[in-house]
Amino acid sequence: MSDMKRMKRDAALKIIAEHVDDSLVVAAYQAAFEWIIIRPSDCNLIATGAMGLVSSHGLGLAIGRPDRKVIVFDGDGSLLMNLGSLVTVGEVEPKNFYHFVCNNGVYEANGSHPTPGSDKIDFAGLASAAGYASTDMFDDLDDLSARIPDVLSRQGPVFVDFRVERGESYPQDYGYMHGAEHRAAFKAALRAS
């Protein structure tokens, strides 16, 4: 998979940020560090320390708040640890669920060791077989910019295989991510109409 075309992850997230309003966003690991700088919001739930569970957290939010879009930024290594979540999402069919997998072929948070099968796995194919309503793959920023409004206007569950690589370095503020103040602000945003 190393010879595949890829986008800088932070550049791709900046494009999506232009199209996110009051959506609830659940982000894991490296995407989380970038997202809280790119689009600071009380509607962001950061899921570091929960490798494999970000899609499950997002699904719970989508079920609990069907009136709000829920956008999940997962990692390929994270999703591999909880592939069963694809089937659960497909069964529940949340119309407000948008699942982006930042597919860089490595466990970036743990030393960039290669993920198993990174040169073979078809995440979008797995999501489609599991029952997601639509799937896409992006590896080009211009294509992403042109098509992301359509992707985010679809009824979910929607799955996007995001072919990415590391971009700029961002601060890793674990104090903020795990802090009581941030959690309280997210709970208030979650309860707001």
Image (cartoon, rainbow, N blue to C red):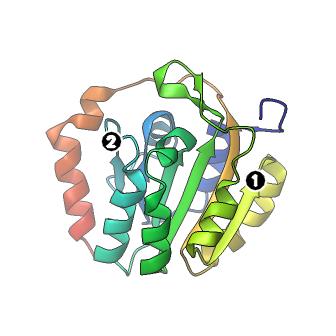
Where 61 falls versus 39 (above or below)?
Answer: below
Q: Is residue 190 left or right of residue 22?
A: left
Question: What is the three-letter code of the residue carrying label 1?
Answer: Phe
- Residue 59 showing in the rendered view: yes
Mark 2: few/some/many CA within 10 Å (<14, 14-19, 20+) = few
Picture quarter with the C terminus: bottom left
How far from the left and from the top, in percent, is residue 17? 57, 53
Question: What is the three-letter code of the residue carrying label 2?
Answer: Ala
Where 152 falls versus 178 (above or below)?
Answer: below
Q: Quadrant of residue 25?
A: bottom left
Which residue is found at the position 32% from the left and 53% from the top?
Answer: 42
Which residue is found at the position 49% from the left and 81% from the top?
Answer: 95
**For this rendering, which residue is in front, 69 or 109?**
109
Q: Which residue is mark 1?
A: 138
How far from the left and from the top, in percent, is residue 190? 26, 65
How far from the left and from the top, in percent, is residue 125? 69, 63
- Residue 94 showing in the rendered view: no
Picture quarter with the N terminus: top right
**Given this view, does label 2 or label 1 mark the residue nearer the observer?**
2
| Disc nearer the start of the sequence (2/1) | 2
Which residue is found at the position 57% from the left and 76% from the top?
Answer: 131
Q: Quadrant of residue 149?
A: bottom right
- Furthest residue in direction top, as rendered: 111
Kindly state the secondary structure of the residue where label 1 is placed: strand
How far from the left and from the top, in percent, is residue 174? 30, 28
Where 167 falls versus 83 (above or below)?
Answer: above
Q: Which residue is mark 2?
A: 50
Which residue is found at the position 35% from the left and 44% from the top?
Answer: 46
Q: Quadrant of residue 123?
A: bottom right
Where 39 falls versus 106 (above or below)?
Answer: below
